[in-house]
Amino acid sequence: MSGEREGPRGLARRLTRYGDAEFALFLRKAFLQAQGLTGEAIDRPVVGIAQTASDFNPCHASAPRLVSAIKRGVTMAGGLPFTFPTISLHESFAFPSSMLLRNLMAMDTEEMLRALPLDAAVLVGGCDKTLPAQIMGAVSAGVPAFVAPVGPMLAGNHEGERLGASTDCRRLWAAWRAGEIDETRLEEAHEHLMPSHGTCMVMGTASTMACLAETFGFVLPGGSSIPAVLAERLRFGERTGRQAVEVARAGMPAPESRITPASLRNAVTVLQALGGSTNALIHLAAIAGRAGLPLDLDEVDRIGRETPVLADLKPVGRGFMEDFHRAGGLPALMRRLGSRLDLSALAADGRTLAEVVDSWPDWTDETVIRPLDEPVAPGEALAVLRGSLAPDGAVLKRAAAGSGLLQHEGPALVFKGLDDLAARIDDPDLPVTPEHVLVLRGAGPIGGPGMPEAGSLPIPRKLARSGVTDMVRISDARMSGTAYGTVVVHVSPEAAAGGALASVRDGDRIRLDFTGRRLDVLVSDEEMAARHESYHPPPAPERGYAQLFARHVTQADRGCDFDFLTSPDSR
Ligand code: FES
């Protein structure tokens, strides 16, 4: 892209190769006239708007109105808006897992940004995998790009209780499994869990990634938390469109310049202070990898130890994204973090973060965005564990875990995959006690495939019915950003890549030592090596994208990106 900045602009960019550039432009202009455009329109800076509305993506139901607002902003600023479709991914409408398709969406976005004659782009996304995929694609394509999140849903209300997706979906489902509520109560609440368009309104993966996109400077200041259905979201869209035209004219900055060691540390610090999603670590590693930077998991852990959780939002705390927005939003949180951040990094509007924070309204709701000395949790939102079970790392969302199991040793109860889990977890004869460590393998990037959000295994029904609410659960899967419990995920390497998880057997003692940041199976190295001898990796899929994915996906610590798409510098 950098070479193109000096060349043709707008619709004269990237002419189709016929061996005759003048004819290619002549033909393209003929098609543009067929589209109803005059010569004056054709000469304007072009802003491409990635449209991800889909009937299979309820989280993006408000995307068309947001796109209209962005187009209005582009036109008002003298640009020419062109929308284009890409893949759209929703968590509940992708089999076997949306994560399997994140890289496909990143490739789709990257290749369209490379192919289309646009000077800048606005990427409209929101549901969990969409923003990371779009940022990965934009960084690799090198096209100046903004992100316009569709915004979170409003919170629901039922019989005096505020409810939110998907944390309360999980809580109520667990309560029903445990026999604490009946089916009628569950069904009544069902209608109130998701009362409006938008993304999950807790600090799940979608909200986390929107905030991190704002931290990196892809989202205009304060834009990550505006609820989807407010008029303010449309005004944000209009402003984003106007800003995109400015960037289209100037040709800067390229998105890779937003991903620096300093901005990456900022993102990790914000992630910890938000009590954000474990999934963000995978997406951050993938985004960093596209820019040639490794994500250092030990630094993630170190930052976590030093960063208190300040956002009182579910699933760690009590509030919802609309509360966070009213409380001051991300700039207010950044002001709290102050010198813990590198405020010389640039925001999406071209100012430094310091300038944004200084000019942001003083008022902050301290019950939602807490002062440093009154945190929701004293630190360690996300912690990184290593040990014989996870030599390349595993992640525990400390802030959403029960404190009673953080130092725990117990016998393993192993599930060999999701089918095995579904078949046995509620078996009345399952040999399980509250002391057991539930182990799920075969659910990693290759084994899942696509690392499904199965890491927060349900408490076996017979234990749930006797009042057990938490157990240590370990897997090579991911967990939803809306989930909670003493859940260790992202065990790397995964079982299907020959990791130690493949050799764990029922009854092996497993030790979780949170204080020491260790995760170990208490079996001798010789015995584990002998077991590994008889390990056979699963057969690769025979064709298509699934085969490409199985052959080239990296492990969780490297972002589950494709090895041929990450920058060599990040390896
Ligand atoms: Fe789309 Fe939660 S399912 S954001």
Image (spheres, rainbow, N blue to C red):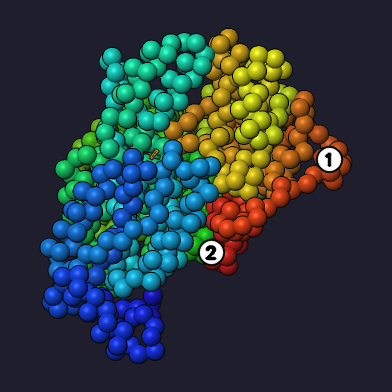
Tell me what residue is drawn at x 52 percent, y 53 percent: 285
On the image, the x and y values in percent for residue 349 come to: 25, 59
- Looking at the rendered structure, the kind of residue marked 2 is Leu
Q: Relative to 562, does residue 403 appear above or below in the rendering? A: above
Amino acid bearing label 1: Arg
> Regarding mark 2 in the picture, which secondary structure is present there?
loop
Residue at 22% in and 64% down: 81
Say whether mark 2 is within 8 Å of ligand 1. no
Q: Earlier in the sequence, mark 2 or mark 1?
A: 1
Q: Is residue 361 visible?
A: yes
Q: Dot 1: few (<14), some (14–19), or many (≥20) neighbours within 10 Å?
A: some
Contact (CB < 8 A) between labels 2 and 1?
A: no
For residue 315, above or below residue 47: above
Residue 450 at x, y percent in the picture: 56, 46
Is residue 417 found left or right of 355 in the rendered image?
Answer: right
Quarter where residue 260 is shown = bottom left
Q: Which mark is residue 565?
A: 2
Q: Secondary structure at mark 1?
A: helix
Ligand 1 - quadrant of the structure image: top left
- Image position, residue 487 (x, y; %): 57, 31
Q: Is mark 1 within 8 Å of ligand 1?
A: no
Residue 241 x/y as whole percent: 21, 59
| 399 or 196, nearer to the observer | 196
Q: Quadrant of the C terminus?
A: bottom right
Image quadrant in which the N terminus is located: bottom left
Residue position for label 1: 531
Between 484 and 428, which is closer to the camera in this rendering?
Answer: 428
Residue pushed farthest front? 34
Occupied quadrant, residue 106: bottom left
**Is residue 364 visible to us here?**
no
